[in-house]
Every structure is written in C-alpha cells, then in structure tokens.
Amino acid sequence: MLGNYFSRTDITCKFSWFVFKCITMNERIEGGCFCGAVRYSFERDEYLSANCHCSMCRRISAAPFVSWMVLPLSCFEYTQGAPKELSSSSHGMRYFCKECGTPIACILKEDPENINITICSLDKPQDFEPKTEIYTNDKLPWGSKDMHRE
Ligand SMILES: [Zn+2]
Ligand SMILES: [Zn+2]
C-alpha cells in the first residue's frame, strides 16, 4: 500500500511538470547545500516550477512543502562534491548532501532526461517564484493561513 501511494505521488509530479527546451545562454544560475559541500549550476532559462505539497516531499524535507524547478539534465552540472542518492520510491531518486542533509534534487525514472531541483537550495531563490501548486489534496491545513506578525 505504501508503495502504491509513493508511485501515485511521483506520477502526479511527472504529469504536472513540463520543461521548455534548454537554450544555450552564458548566464549560469548557482546553488548548493547548507554546508557548501555540494554546489551546482545550470543555464538560465524559463523553467517550470511548482510547490509540491505531497507527503513524501514534506517528510523528506521536514517542511510544509517543497518548491521545485524542473530543467533538462543536459543544462545542469555539479560544480563541487556529489550528493548522496536515496531511492525514495520505485519511481524516483532523491539527492541530498551527505554532510548536512540539504535536499538538492529529484530525478524520476520515467523522466530521466530532466532533473528537479529544490528552489530553496538556489543562491537566489527570491528570483524563482513557483508558478503552480501540485498535490494540494495533501496540503497541510495550516500551511497558508495568515499569521500574526510579531
Ligand atoms: Zn552540505
Ligand atoms: Zn512532492
């Protein structure tokens, strides 16, 4: 049962995300983990992005949701270190820093040409606002309430 649930999650992600073909440009976008052991970069372009509210993203990041951007693997490279792999379900591999635990990326077996990267591991996540929300049935009820501000 658990396996079926995870499969449904990854298939939802796959059908929810498309990516535009990568156009070669000079500007590189950079990101990395909390401790700096893993660094990556990719070519700036228009990529689709989404906040994923699925329970697997939530648990693996220990955050209410994860903001993802999907881009062609051919546009992406690790510039320092290498992440640890985790087979998080039969449909996908997750990648995170083995030193500090920062979630970096996810690659779906059904979509091996593309890599999903965590927007909040970018050096400037403020420049990449997610445009859609996916798996909202799993969204935490308190996730978007207006909070009292101190
Ligand atoms: Zn790290
Ligand atoms: Zn998810």
Image: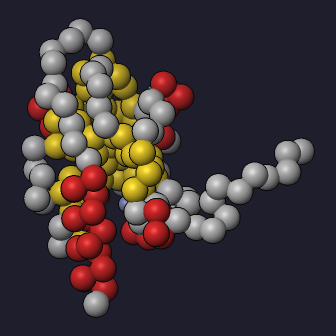
In the image, residue 141 lies at what x, y percent?
A: 63, 68
- Give the side of residue 115 with respect to residue 29, left or right: left
Kindly identify the residue that appears in the image at 18 percent across and 73 percent down: 90
Direction right: furthest residue: 150
In the image, residue 57 lies at what x, y percent?
A: 41, 62
Kindly identify the residue that appears in the image at 31 percent across and 37 percent down: 48
Coloring scheme of the render? secondary structure
- Give the side of residue 136 with respect to residue 87, left or right: right
Kindly identify the residue that appears in the image at 31 percent across and 85 percent down: 2
Which of the two residues, 32 or 54, is positioned nearer the viewer here? 54
In the image, residue 34 lies at what x, y percent?
A: 49, 42
Quadrant of the rendered image containing residue 18: top left
Instruction: Mark yes or no: residue 72 visible.
Output: yes
Quadrant that contains the C terminus: top right
Which of the two residues, 104 or 18, is positioned nearer the viewer here? 18
Instruction: Mark yes or no: residue 106 visible.
Output: no
Which of the two residues, 36 or 145, is positioned nearer the viewer here? 145
In the image, residue 73 lies at what x, y percent?
A: 15, 37
Quadrant of the rendered image containing residue 77: top left
Kindly identify the residue that appears in the image at 46 percent across and 69 percent down: 137
Numbered marks: total: 0
- Give the side of residue 35 with respect to residue 9, left or right: right
Quadrant that contains the N terminus: bottom left
Quadrant of the rendered image containing residue 98: bottom left
